[in-house]
Amino acid sequence: MIETKYAKIIAKIATIDPVKYGKTRNFLWGNVSQLSPYVSRGVISTKQIVDSLVHRGFKPFQIERLLQQLSWRDYFQRTAQQFPDLSERNVKNDPLHFKSTGIPNAILNAEIGIDALDEGIEQLLETGWIHNHMRMYLSMLHTNVARCDWRSGARWMYYHLLDADMASNDLSWQWVCGANSNKLYVANQENINKYAGSKQGKTFLDVDYDAFSDMPIPEPLRNTQDLSLTPTAVSIESLRKTTTILSPGEVFPNAKNSVLLYSWNNLDPKWREDESHRRILLLDADEFERRPISARTLEFVLALSKNIYELEIVYGRFDALQAQLPEHTFIFKEHPTQIGWKGQEDTRDWIFPEVTQYTPSFFGFWKKCEKYLKQF
Ligand SMILES: Cc1cc2nc3c(=O)[nH]c(=O)nc-3n(C[C@H](O)[C@H](O)[C@H](O)COP(=O)(O)OP(=O)(O)OC[C@H]3O[C@@H](n4cnc5c(N)ncnc54)[C@H](O)[C@@H]3O)c2cc1C
């Protein structure tokens, strides 16, 4: 199981080698941080990672590649604030090349026939984390080669990822298939071999790039099925055997009438740490119906929640919890998926808090951020 103790997570930040990162990050074996599960669960922030690098004496030019990648995350979060319905709507263009709303059986069963990709799927199913390049390969295969709608592929990957994040995931899927970009991303076998370190040939992707535009759907990808995922509510029921997870009706007022309301996107043990409030983690049933997550991701969330002192865990809807505690003030960190949450909203930490406006392209956003690089 992945590390979940706060002190060990913080220690991991200090082991990042940003220079090696810059040189190797595109390779599947590259020196990447694997911190995304903690960033997505709100245990640590992108800003905290940058602050740690600066504190260790690195100058902006030495950490630029990593800084840019971290900024991609903040960029996607800003975009999600602008388009909270982005799991359903295409942000820029409506792709016209999809032939199915399902998902290829070969992806579900890791039987594509391209060894590196089948290994990537197995890694995702076994560990809940895969490299960025693998995510791009799988999404381009689903959308641009098998011509399946990005939404089914995005829901499938999100379900399995420990770092599942609506903005980074769905906007990346949209970027790959041209819904959030102006061209389709494809990779051939030569590219996969280069970054995966494999040597496979004679596969359906062993072609030149100009073959992609009118490529018939390859035989192994032709059988598709509708995506069917175990509802998160079912996983909650089985976790109740070992963990106290209340329903809103089981929560009663107590002497403290202010509640710090944590979510699976905010499990920051340092948030208002020295203040005296009741602390409740709301596993938002509405959100998990929109975008289900796996039992493993839920277990990860519960393990991370142990870093927070005296936390009550509730599965249900915000309105129902509020109805149970009508005299309480709710305080929570802003997040675009917390639709209908009412109370006092704290801002999240941003690397460049000054750059708040939506920009249609990452590089437009980055240009605005660059002006503030001097402050590091
Ligand atoms: C199809 C697809 C789906 C994705 N789904 C998710 C998702 O659900 N959740 C998620 O957190 N990331 C997602 N990403 C972005 C990226 O793949 C992961 O954040 C990254 O691979 C995590 O590994 P790492 O922590 O080792 O990253 P590192 O390379 O070490 O980067 C450090 C941090 O920067 C951020 N970051 C790096 N690259 C990106 C990127 N391309 N986009 C956004 N943030 C980035 C992450 O917070 C990451 O932890 C997706 C990318 C693609 C192409």
Image: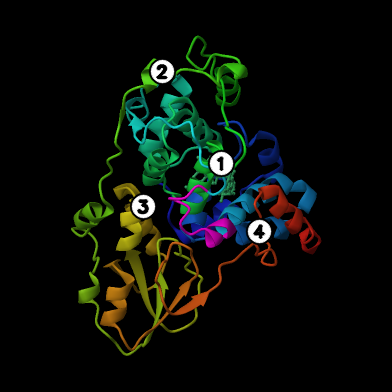
Q: Is residue 83 magenta?
A: yes
Within-10-Å neighbours for mark 4: few <14, some 14–19, many 20+: some
Mark earlier in primary sequence (2, 4): 4
Mark closer to the observer (2, 4)? 2
Q: Amino acid at mark 2?
A: Gly
Within-10-Å neighbours for mark 1: few <14, some 14–19, many 20+: many
Element on which disc 4 rests: helix
Q: Mark 3 touching mark 1, by CB under 8 A?
A: no
Q: Is residue 258 magenta?
A: no
Q: Amino acid at mark 3?
A: Arg
Residue stretch in magenta: 78-90
Name the foreground residue: 276 vs 314: 314
Q: Residue at label 4?
A: 52
Question: Disc number at residue 113?
Answer: 2
Mark earlier in primary sequence (3, 1): 1
* Horizontal and vertical percent position of residue 299: 32, 53
Mark closer to the observer (3, 4)? 3
Mark closer to the observer (3, 2)? 3
Mark earlier in primary sequence (1, 4): 4
Element on which disc 1 rests: helix
Q: Residue at label 3?
A: 291
Residue found 29% across the figure and 49% down from its top: 295
